[in-house]
């Protein structure tokens, strides 16, 4: 009975150690992803080329890669 209790305590400690380690890895991955500067990509409504969302020209029918394509699609 004594060994069973020791085994149970060992398994709980092992589980807590692995859980804490997994959380550290997950947090490190999130920091790496944020530091890499992940940017949303959007397709141009006229030519279909993908570009960063913050560089896109917004129009009434969608986003465009340039003002020329916006004017070509939305006269
Ligand atoms: Zn375009």
Image: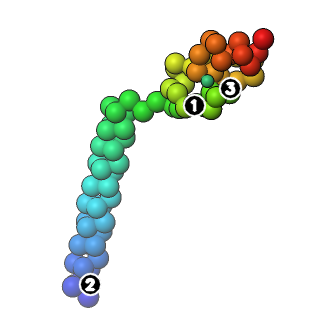
Task: Judge whether residue 62 can be spotted in this image.
Answer: yes
Are there few (<14), some (14-19), or many (20+) residues within 10 Å of tag 1?
few
- Which residue is label 3 attached to? 46
Q: Tell me whether the residue at label 3 lies in contact with that at label 2, contact meaning CB atoms closer than 8 angstroms.
A: no
Residue at 46% across / 30% down in the picture? 39
Which part of the image, by quadrant, shows the N terminus? Answer: bottom left
Residue at 26% across / 84% down in the picture? 4
Q: Where does residue 22 sit, x and y in percent of width and height? A: 32, 55
The answer to whether the residue bearing label 2 lies less than 8 angstroms from the nearest atom of ligand 1 is no
Residue at 68% across / 27% down in the picture? 45
The answer to whether the residue bearing label 1 lies less than 8 angstroms from the nearest atom of ligand 1 is yes
For mark 2, give the secondary structure. helix
Q: Above or below — where is 41 with respect to 1?
A: above
- Going from the N terminus, do you reach mark 1 or mark 2 first? 2
Q: Tell me whether the residue at label 1 lies in contact with that at label 2, contact meaning CB atoms closer than 8 angstroms.
A: no
Depth check: give the residue in front, 23 or 46.
46
Depth check: give the residue in front, 71 or 22.
71
Label number found at residue 3: none
For mark 1, give the secondary structure. loop
Mark pair 1, 2: CA separation:
64 Å
For the residues carrying marks 3 and 2, which lies nearer the camera in this image? 3
For mark 3, give the secondary structure. loop
- Which residue is label 1 attached to? 49
Residue 2, by quadrant, is bottom left
Label number found at residue 4: 2
Q: Above or below — where is 18 with respect to 26?
A: below
Mark pair 3, 2: CA separation:
69 Å
For the residues carrying marks 1 and 2, which lies nearer the camera in this image? 1
The answer to whether the residue bearing label 3 lies less than 8 angstroms from the nearest atom of ligand 1 is yes
Q: Where does residue 54 sit, x and y in percent of width and height? A: 52, 20
Residue 61, by quadrant, is top right
């Amino acid at each position: 009975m004594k060994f069973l209790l020791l085994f149970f305590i060992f398994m709980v400690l092992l589980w807590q150690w692995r859980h804490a380690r997994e959380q550290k890895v997950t947090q490190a991955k999130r920091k790496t992803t944020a530091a890499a500067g992940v940017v949303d990509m959007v397709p141009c409504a006229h030519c279909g080329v993908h570009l960063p969302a913050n560089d896109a020209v917004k129009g009434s029918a969608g986003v465009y890669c340039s003002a020329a394509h916006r004017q070509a699609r939305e006269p």
